[in-house]
Each structure stands twice: as C-alpha cells, then as structure tokens.
Image: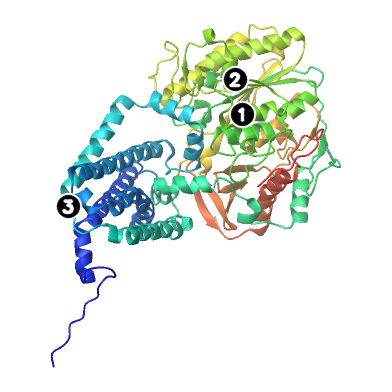
C-alpha cells in the first residue's frame, strides 16, 4: 500500500512545510539576528579570556574552575545578548520585505547594525578598563558613577586618550559591520509582515527567559576564587542587576539572632570602666546610649584636631608598614614621631564607606553607606561629640561635595562644609574632575585653622583629599613621577601632606594641634577571596609632637574605632551612640575588626574570620596568612558567629529605629 506523505503547514501561509519556511527565514532575517548574536557571544568570550590572561596571578587555573567559569559565562552572555539583539530584531521583523530589498532599506539595516556594534565595542573597552581598575565586572560602583555623569565623563576624558579611542571604536565597529554585511542575505524572501507578530513575541519571550533563568547564585558556585566568579559574569548583566539591587535588607537576606541576645551581646561588648549606660529617650528596640567619661592631661587643654582622610592610601605603598613599594618617604619619616596604629582595617572599599566609619563609628551595613541613605540627618557623629565639648567642626573636601551626598550629610550633622566651590578660582592652579590639587586643599585648611585660632575657638577639621585618584593629575615640579599613574598620585599626596605640616609648624596653633592621617580605604580590594583581609589594611598615624608621645599600637583595631579612641586620647567626655570602642579600654583578646563588600560582611576576631552572605549564609575561616589572605575553612562556631551577627544585625536595627541619632536630637527612623 502506498504510504501517504504528511507535512505540517504554518497558519495563514501558502502551504509551505514548516521546515521549508524555517529554512527560508534562516536565510533571511534570522540569519542577520544569528550573526549579530554570535558576534556578541564571541566578543564577550574573547573579553573574558583577555581579562583572565591579565590576571593570571589572581585566578584559579584549575581545569574544573576554568571550565565552569567559561560555561557559566556563556549563560550570562546569552542572557544579555538577547537584549543587545532586540533592536535589530524589531527592525527586521517589522520592516516589509520590499523595503529590505531596496538600497535604502539595506542601508538602514547596516546603520542599525553599525550602531549596535559600536555600542558593543564601546562596552567591551569599558569593561576591559573597569576590570583593570577593580578586577570585577560592572557592579554597584559603575551604577554609582553613572549617577555622577560629570565626574564619570571627566575622569574618562582626563584618564584616557579619547580622540584616539573613540575613532578606533568606530573603525572596529565599521569593520565588524562590513564582515557581517557580507554574510547578510542579498535578497530577502517572504512578505515579512506575516511573521512580524510571531517574531516579536518570540524575542520578548527570550527576553523574559533571559531575566528569569540566570540565577546570580550560579556564579558563586563556579569557584572559591572570587576572580573566577567575576569572570563568569557578564558586564551588561551585572550593571542592570546592580541597578535593581542597590539596597539590601539585612533582616530579609542575612542570618539573625534573637533581639534580646543581640542587645545583650552589644552591651557586653561596649561596656568599659569609664562607660555608664543611659536610658535613650525616644529609642525603640536596641539602645546603646551611654555616657563615656575620659579624663587626662589634655582634657582642659582642648587641642585642635585635623583629621586628614587620604584617598586610597594603602599600606602596600608605605615602607613603615613593610609595603611592597616605598612611595611615601615623607610619611615614613614622620611615622617615627607619631603614635602609629599598625593593624587598623578599613570597613569597606569606597570613600563613602570610610567616611561612614570615621564619622559615625558604625560597622558597614549591606548595600549603600548611611551617608547616601534616607535619614542621614542628625546622627551621632565625631563632629557632634567634638561640638558637645565646645569645638567647631568643619568638613573640607577638594571636590564637589554633592558627590556621594557628602555636603548634605555633613551639613545636616553640624559641620561647616567647605568644598571646591568654596575655593577662590584664582587659588586653583591644578585640578582634575575629582578635585583640586591636595596642596590647594591644605591651603584652605590652614586658612580655616587661622580663622578659628583668631576667634579663640578649638577646631576639628575633617579633611578629604582627592589627588590620589584616577586620573592622578598633580602640579609639575613637585615630585619625580609621571603624570597619570598611581605612583605619582601617592607620591604627590605624600609630598602635599609634608608641605602642609611644614607650613603648619610655623603657625602659633601648631603645638596645640593633633594631626590624624588615615586612609579611607585601600587602592584596590581585589583578591582571590571574597574578603581578602590584606586589602583592608590601612595606615593611621597620630602626630602631635608637643602633646602625644610617639609609639606603636599593634592591637587589631577597626577603622570605626578611631573616633572613640581619638576622643579617649584627647580626654573628651561625651554621650555616645557609637558602636566603635576606645581601643585603650578594650580587654586583651577582645579586639575585632569589620571588613565588607557591598554584600559580603566580614567579622575578624583573633585569627578567625566570619563571612555573612545573602541567603542567610555564614561561614568561618582561620586566617592562615594575613599578608596573602590565605584562609582555611573551619567548622561552624556558634559563639563566634553569634557575636558577628550581633554587630551587623545591631547596626541595621539601630539605624532603622533611630538608635544612631544624636542623643540631643529627636530620633528619625531610617529605612532598610
């Protein structure tokens, strides 16, 4: 019996079999989409390989890790590639075939392809440069920088040769478009409109899948090496993810302990012989309000304080801290006359995080710094404690203070704010997009101190430098270093601080002034682990030759402990809601530090490190090598983890309930 032949036919068609219809489409519109999508995938894989080759000393080269890195990367690449292809898909599916077969239609197709390729090449270049700076894909830092468009564009213009880079991008995009155009069909078949709706729906379905299918936790399972995890990601995907996950709720994502346990642990940790806990009026939940009584030879003398917060000053650059290079000859020489903290650790990796620790004395909470959150006004700050003791507090910044909400934060917390706009134009002779040369900033500090001295009022000057920041522009004839490099930025800042102190020595207020030199964070926090402890080690020098004897304090101390420790050294009593502690009152063996990224929270106690991660995860490690951040995984330690959680959970709850507000003001609840 003769077998009947069946064929599937598409609706509303002319009876073509499905496979024949698909073959024709593959030769037409789908070929164009496929070519562009494969170009995108190949480009992202090539970038991943290049970034890996430039970071061989940081990545895991184990075969399994590399395989998972690239295979997982393909999933994220495909996810973002669908969105990159979407504009071309819309054009191809909506334009009638007769238009595509005309010169004007083909020209429009090639123009759209060129624009997409130019955007792709630009993104690849940006991702490569971003990786060289941070050793990560686009993340929350990229999102933050995009908000401050002027600074971002200015930094790019000053750091890179854009008159060469931009034409090169255009040429590369044109070459790729030409190669793709040669593979585009010479003649498109079919009416086009019949498949428009189906095609657009298919692309939209793929876009939905691209959002839903990838799980950010996939990357975490790629390797224990954080660089492999970052390499497995995709830049555009990471940027969009960071944009929509810019705030992180501690109660929702992190491990918690019972509220009474947290309260008890915090009060026990903050107790000291000179501390009396008070009834914090208006507070809800946890209350750490206390009276701290400090009394010493400096109590009546009320010395001035100048705290110089140095941008990205790593211990790696300082000989006195046994750094890998010696770019700070002046600070190294000065250290012998200072009281030096040799084991201070920054709480985070950004300036806004360092200022939070130094001003508010709180651990880093997940997500944004408190400086950039709601309810940043009227908090208990170092400047507020100084004001309580009769001081006038200033915040001086070489850049525009709207960046990272600095002006608004310090102004609303009792500081007088002086930023770039406060400096007379005739006094600015060298500047970058981030700020004026440090020596110009220090000249403003001298003027402010002279004014306070003339009025007979003790002063607290909080200074934030900018010269040690890309693009590393500084005045000529100051140091022997090239413009535009990290070495030059460090050496110039070192020189500028030395020059400032030499000029200050000639002022009548010098002998009654305490100078504090501390970093906001290290220059880079990239490493093989999620929290490389050596990348949080920062310098801290206290210089007051007529008031404080030189010495070295080698106890573990957090950046957030500096404010209460300094107040103790000055003999200043105050009402406190700080979570930091005066290291002089901390019993031996109870030292701790806090290190963090945007999501991962670290608690260091002795040689143990607790990591808290979203998903209510926690893990315990032994720090086997502090210099190389080599860790050994340990079994769970409930007591240690409880203490770590108490600090972080407590900080989040205190901010949320208004428990970090200045005790003399009405509390204002924050938001998580």
Residue at the image position 24 percent from the left and 75 percent from the top: 8
Foreground mark, 3 or 1? 3
In this rendering, the answer to whether 446 lies above or below 32 is above
Residue at the image position 77 percent from the left and 34 percent from the top: 662
Q: Does any portion of residue 121 appear in the rendered image?
A: yes
Q: Foreground: 536 or 659?
A: 659
Residue at the image position 53 percent from the left and 22 percent from the top: 332
> Which of the numbered marks, if any, corresponds to residue 419?
2
Q: Foreground: 663 or 487?
A: 663
Question: Residue 257 at what x, y percent from top left?
Answer: 70, 57
> Which of the numbered marks, if any, corresponds to residue 185?
3
Residue at image mark 1: 406
Give the structural element (helix, strand or loop) at label 3. Answer: loop
Question: Residue 329 at what x, y percent from top left?
Answer: 49, 19
User: Which quadrant of the figure has residue 194?
Assistant: bottom left
User: Which quadrant of the figure has residue 400?
Assistant: top right
Quadrant containing the N terminus is bottom left
Mark 1 / mark 2, whichever is N-terminal: 1
Residue at the image position 21 percent from the left and 59 percent from the top: 190
Give the structural element (helix, strand or loop) at label 2. Answer: loop
Report, in whole angstroms, how far the alpha carbon at label 3 lies from the one at label 2.
Answer: 59 Å
């Amino acid at each position: 019996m003769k077998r009947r032949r069946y064929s599937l036919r598409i609706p509303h068609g002319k009876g073509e079999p499905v496979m024949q219809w698909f073959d024709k489409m593959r030769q037409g519109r789908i070929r164009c989409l496929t070519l562009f999508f494969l170009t995108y995938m190949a480009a992202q894989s090539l970038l991943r390989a290049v970034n890996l080759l430039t970071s061989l000393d940081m990545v895991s080269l184990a075969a399994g890790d590399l395989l998972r890195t690239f295979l997982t990367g393909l999933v994220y690449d495909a996810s973002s590639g669908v969105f990159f292809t979407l504009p071309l898909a819309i054009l191809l599916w909506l334009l009638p075939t007769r238009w595509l077969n005309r010169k004007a239609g083909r020209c429009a197709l090639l123009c759209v392809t060129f624009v997409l390729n130019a955007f792709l090449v630009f993104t690849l270049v940006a991702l490569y440069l971003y990786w060289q700076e941070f050793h990560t894909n686009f993340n929350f830092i990229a999102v933050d920088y995009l908000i401050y468009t002027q600074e971002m564009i200015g930094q790019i213009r000053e750091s890179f040769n854009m008159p060469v880079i931009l034409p090169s991008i255009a040429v590369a995009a044109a070459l790729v478009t030409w190669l793709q155009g040669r593979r585009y069909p010479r003649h498109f078949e079919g009416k086009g409109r019949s498949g428009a709706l189906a095609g657009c729906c298919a692309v939209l379905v793929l876009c939905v899948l691209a959002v839903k299918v990838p799980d950010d936790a996939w990357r975490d399972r790629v390797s224990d090496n954080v660089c492999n995890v970052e390499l497995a990601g995709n830049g555009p995907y990471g940027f969009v993810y960071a944009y929509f996950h810019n705030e992180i709720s501690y109660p929702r994502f992190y491990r918690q302990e019972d509220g009474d346990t947290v309260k008890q642990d915090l009060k026990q940790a903050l107790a000291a012989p000179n501390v009396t806990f008070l009834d914090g009026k208006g507070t809800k939940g946890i209350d750490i309000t206390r009276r701290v009584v400090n009394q010493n030879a400096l109590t009546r003398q009320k010395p001035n304080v100048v705290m110089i917060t140095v941008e990205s000053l790593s211990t790696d650059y300082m000989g006195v801290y046994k750094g890998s290079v010696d770019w700070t000859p002046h600070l190294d020489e000065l250290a012998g006359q200072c009281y030096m903290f040799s084991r201070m650790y920054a709480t985070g990796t950004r300036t806004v995080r360092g200022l939070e620790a130094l001003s508010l004395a709180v651990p880093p909470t997940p997500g944004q710094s408190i400086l950039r959150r709601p309810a940043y006004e009227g908090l208990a700050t170092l400047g507020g404690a100084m004001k309580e003791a009769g001081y006038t507090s200033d915040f001086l910044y070489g850049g525009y203070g709207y960046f990272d909400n600095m002006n608004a934060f310090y102004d609303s917390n009792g500081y007088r704010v002086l930023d770039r706009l406060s400096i007379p134009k005739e006094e600015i002779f060298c500047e970058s997009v981030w700020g004026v040369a440090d020596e110009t900033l220090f000249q403003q500090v001298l003027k402010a101190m002279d004014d306070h001295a003339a009025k007979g009022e003790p002063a607290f000057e909080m200074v934030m430098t900018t010269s040690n920041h890309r693009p590393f522009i500084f005045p000529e004839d100051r140091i022997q270093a090239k413009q535009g490099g990290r070495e030059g930025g460090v050496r110039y800042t070192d020189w500028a601080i030395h020059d400032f102190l030499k000029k200050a020595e000639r002022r009548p207020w010098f002998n009654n002034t305490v100078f504090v030199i501390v970093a906001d964070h290290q220059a880079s926090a990239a490493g093989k682990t999620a929290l490389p402890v050596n990348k949080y080690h920062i310098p801290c020098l206290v210089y007051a030759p007529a008031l404080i004897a030189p010495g070295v304090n080698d106890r573990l101390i957090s950046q957030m402990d500096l404010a209460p420790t300094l107040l103790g050294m000055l003999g200043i009593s105050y009402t406190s809601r700080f979570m930091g502690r005066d290291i002089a009152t901390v019993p031996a063996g109870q030292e701790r530090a806090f290190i963090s990224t945007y999501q991962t929270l670290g608690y260091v106690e002795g040689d143990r490190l607790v990591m808290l991660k979203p998903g209510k995860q926690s893990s315990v490690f032994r720090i086997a090598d502090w210099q190389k951040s080599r860790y050994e995984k340990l079994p769970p330690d409930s007591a240690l983890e409880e203490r770590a959680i108490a600090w972080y959970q407590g900080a989040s709850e205190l901010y949320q309930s208004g428990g970090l507000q200045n005790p003399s003001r009405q509390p204002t609840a924050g938001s998580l």
